[in-house]
Amino acid sequence: MADRKLPTKSSSDEVQEFLQKVALTPKRASSSGDPGRLLFAMDATASREPTWDRASSLQGAMFQETVALGGLEIQLCYYRGFGEFKATKWMTDSQALLRQMTGVFCLAGETQIAKVLRHAVQETKEKPVDALVFVGDCVEEDVDKLGHIAGELGILGVPVFVFQEGYDGMAEFAFKQIAALTNGAYCRFDSSSAQTLRELLQAVAVYAAGGRPALEDLAKSRGGAVLQIAHQVNRG
């Protein structure tokens, strides 16, 4: 299909806009000192198979910068095949999570993003979730229905940070709606921008663990894509 053609790379404007929105997202207050809680959801249908391993390995970056901030709890969830949806237990060990992810293989099937969003609502009602990260490449569901569930997450204060692989116009529209309704952010990536995706995942993880001040510190110390928001963070 023509609209599935990949761009050469994620534009610097898209990266900067994404990071600026992360920086301006209010962090849920925590009086218990518990680790940040991040849901990491992935599309594991057949179209994602060529890049699944690469995206899976990048999740380790989400832990690296959060230890000094009190740590990070991550739950992996994914969908694939004929209505299959799985969610792991909450984990603080990057190696344990990586083993879970590398044990998953892709299966042909339709998208189940509504299940991801409903799961995030349910988890948050049981114990607050600080952010939801979703990585996918297409949408085969009713956008209005997805928007309704996203609106629930927005009311609950759970931002969705959406990473779209490649380019699909309908998916881009739906993903941007989900991000907007939850006060989250959207960014596209492709096979040439793995390092950028790594830095963006780090930024979201640091936000989930320590909020805006921690993200500002990351921008100062790590540089790269995250450095692009240092001035916006300081002005906010």
Image (spheres, helix red, strand yellow):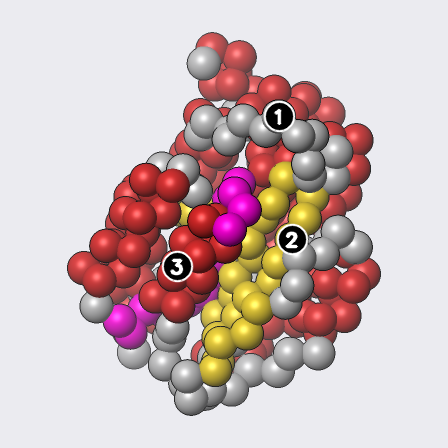
Residue 1 horizontal/vertical position (percent):
29, 78
Q: Residues within 10 Å of mark 1 (few under 14, many from 20)?
A: few
Q: Which mark is residue 74?
A: 2
Left or right position of 154 against 217: left
Q: Residues within 10 Å of mark 3 (few under 14, many from 20)?
A: many
Residue 210 horizontal/vertical position (percent):
64, 29
Separation (CA) of disc 1 from disc 3:
26 Å
Q: Which mark is residue 31?
A: 1
Residue at the spot 29% in from the left edge and 43% down from the top edge: 181
Q: Which residues are magenta?
A: 126-141
Mark 2 belongs to which amino acid? Ile
Residue at the spot 67% in from the left edge and 22% down from the top edge: 217
Asked if marks 1 and 3 touch (Cβ < 8 Å), the reply is: no
Left or right position of 224 against 41: right
Residue at the spot 81% in from the left edge and 61% down from the top edge: 95
Tag 3's secondary structure? helix
Q: Quadrant of the C terminus?
A: top left
* Mark sitting earlier along the chain (1/3): 1
**Residue 141 sits in quarter:** bottom left
Question: Which residue occupies the foreground of this view, 107 or 228?
Answer: 107
* Mark sitting earlier along the chain (3/2): 2
Mark 1 belongs to which amino acid? Ser
Q: Which mark is residue 117?
A: 3
Mark 3 belongs to which amino acid? Leu
Separation (CA) of disc 3 from disc 2:
16 Å
Residue at the spot 27% in from the left edge and 60% down from the top edge: 146
Residue 104 horizontal/vertical position (percent):
64, 78
Say whether residue 134 is magenta: yes
* Mark sitting earlier along the chain (1/2): 1
Residue 154 horizontal/vertical position (percent):
34, 42
